Image: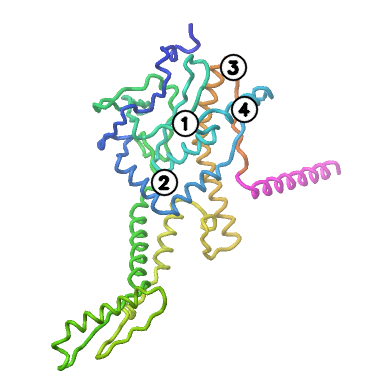
């Protein structure tokens, strides 16, 4: 009898379940309640507004690393070596690469789907795979506490995955009664649209005003009216030659000719205030301190410390969500190897400031204990 009955299948069944070989993506399909258009909107927003992309990648890099502790030195060494060298997708290794892509998918779309891929003998974990949300659908299985992971066929029908125990699924900030998550970019498409309009307008104005254009006007007198067309053509040709010359060239003409700069009387509108207001909305939505994104806004040292503390709490929240994914991967590894043990996921401290605060807290506790013991003896 196999170790797991749900894994006893023929060899061809050990392929990636959440990959759509047909490459079929329906425009009307729903992934956990979010449409393809909505996902494309969030993806375009992230790629269009550099601040949003930078904030998301800052969050991912600040997550840090973790270690698995089981209480056994040998088991700790084996599981941590396995997580460090596990194959991820096509050309990556290490669970950190998997979690980075997994967290990015969850932040941008609200829902992330991955898969634990076994070898053909179903005895070991072969790789970790980040599934595309266009290849799977998450539906309710008649019970609000249960979900079913399905793949979409070329004819539009849904097929449940054969090994749901190997599929990883996480949602961030799901709405009550819903199985899908909420993107952290929700509410920002309107802000991003206004911001890009301002940037486009600034670029157009600079193209019109910054790149100087001239208006050459020729007013012929009564004696020159019969030759005005030929003279205007001559003036236009000479002016064009003067402008196309690689070196400064004089333009000499006769008659009543005036030259003016187009748009010289106008000024480019100041965009500092509206742009900053929009960026403040984006920074507030993503909970990233402005100084981490290169914004030199006026702030105080205490305010910077409070912003760093808020960011720490945000990162702790994301770590709690990822803990369930890491736990499922480690549980599968231990069960496949016939090991029954408890373990703990120990994350690194987020920054050096946390190390300083922890050291200071230990010092104060040690001084308090020493003082209490001294007073107790007296």
Choose mark 4 or mark 1, whichever is in front.
1
- Going from N to C along the chain, the mark reached first, 4 or 1, is 4
* Residue 213 against residue 297 in the figure, above or below: below
Q: From the image, tell me which residue sits under label 1.
A: 90
- The quarter of the picture where the C terminus appears is top right
- Which residues lie in the magenta part? 350-378
Q: Position of residue 103 (x, y in %)?
A: 47, 39
| Label drawn at residue 339 | 3
Instruction: Kindly indicate the quadrant of the structure image that contains residue 228.
Output: bottom left
The kind of secondary structure element at disc 4 is helix
Choose mark 3 or mark 1, whichever is in front.
1
Q: From the image, tell me which residue sits under label 4.
A: 81
The kind of secondary structure element at disc 3 is loop
Crowd class of label 2 (few under 14; some 14 to 19; many from 20; radius 10 Å) = some
Crowd class of label 1 (few under 14; some 14 to 19; many from 20; radius 10 Å) = few
Q: From the image, tell me which residue sits under label 2.
A: 184
> Which of these two is toward me, 140 or 23?
23
Instruction: Kindly indicate the quadrant of the structure image that contains residue 23.
Output: top left
* Residue 43 against residue 276 in the figure, above or below: above
Distance of label 4 from label 1 (alpha carbons): 20 Å
> Which of these two is toward me, 75 or 25?
25
| Label drawn at residue 205 | none
Magenta stretch encompasses residue 328: no
What residue is rendered at 60% in x and 37% in y?
Answer: 347
Q: Is residue 247 left or right of residue 258?
A: right
Instruction: Kindly indicate the quadrant of the structure image that contains residue 301.
Output: bottom right
Instruction: Kindly report the secondary structure that dominates the magenta region of the rendered protein.
Output: helix
Distance of label 3 from label 1 (alpha carbons): 29 Å
Magenta stretch encompasses residue 352: yes
Residue placed farthest to the top in the image? 1
Choose mark 4 or mark 2, whichever is in front.
4
């Amino acid at each position: 009898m196999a170790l797991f009955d749900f894994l006893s299948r023929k060899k061809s069944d050990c392929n990636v379940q959440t990959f759509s070989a047909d490459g079929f993506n329906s425009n009307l399909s729903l992934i956990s309640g979010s449409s393809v258009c909505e996902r494309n909107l969030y993806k375009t927003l992230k790629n269009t507004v550099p601040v949003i992309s930078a904030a998301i990648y800052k969050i991912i890099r600040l997550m840090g690393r973790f270690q698995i502790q089981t209480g056994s030195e040998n088991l700790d060494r084996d599981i941590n070596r396995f997580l460090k060298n596990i194959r991820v997708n096509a050309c990556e290794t290490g669970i950190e690469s998997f979690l980075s892509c997994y967290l990015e998918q969850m932040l941008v779309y609200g829902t992330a789907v991955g898969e634990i891929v076994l070898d053909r003998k179903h005895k070991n974990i072969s790789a970790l795979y980040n599934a595309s949300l266009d290849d799977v659908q998450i539906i309710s299985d008649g019970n609000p506490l249960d979900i079913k992971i399905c793949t979409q066929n070329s004819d539009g029908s849904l097929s449940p995955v054969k090994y749901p125990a190997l599929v990883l699924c996480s949602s961030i900030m799901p709405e009550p009664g819903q199985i899908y998550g909420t993107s952290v970019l929700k509410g920002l498409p309107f802000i991003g649209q206004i911001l890009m309009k301002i940037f486009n307008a600034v670029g157009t104005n600079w193209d019109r005003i910054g790149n100087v254009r001239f208006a050459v006007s020729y007013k012929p007198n009564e004696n020159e009216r019969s030759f005005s067309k030929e003279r205007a053509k001559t003036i236009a040709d000479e002016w064009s030659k003067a402008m196309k010359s690689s070196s400064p060239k004089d333009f000499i003409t006769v008659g009543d000719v005036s030259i003016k700069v187009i748009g010289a009387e106008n000024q480019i509108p100041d965009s500092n205030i509206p742009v900053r207001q929009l960026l403040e909305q984006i920074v507030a939505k993503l909970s990233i301190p402005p100084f981490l994104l290169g914004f030199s806004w006026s702030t105080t040292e205490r305010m910077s410390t409070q912003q760093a503390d808020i960011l720490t709490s945000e990162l702790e929240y994301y770590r709690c969500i990822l803990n369930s994914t890491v736990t499922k991967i480690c549980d599968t590894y231990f069960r496949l190897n016939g090991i029954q043990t408890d373990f703990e996921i120990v994350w690194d401290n987020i920054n050096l400031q946390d190390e300083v605060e922890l050291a200071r807290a230990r010092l104060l506790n040690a001084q308090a204990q020493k003082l209490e013991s001294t007073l107790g003896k007296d």
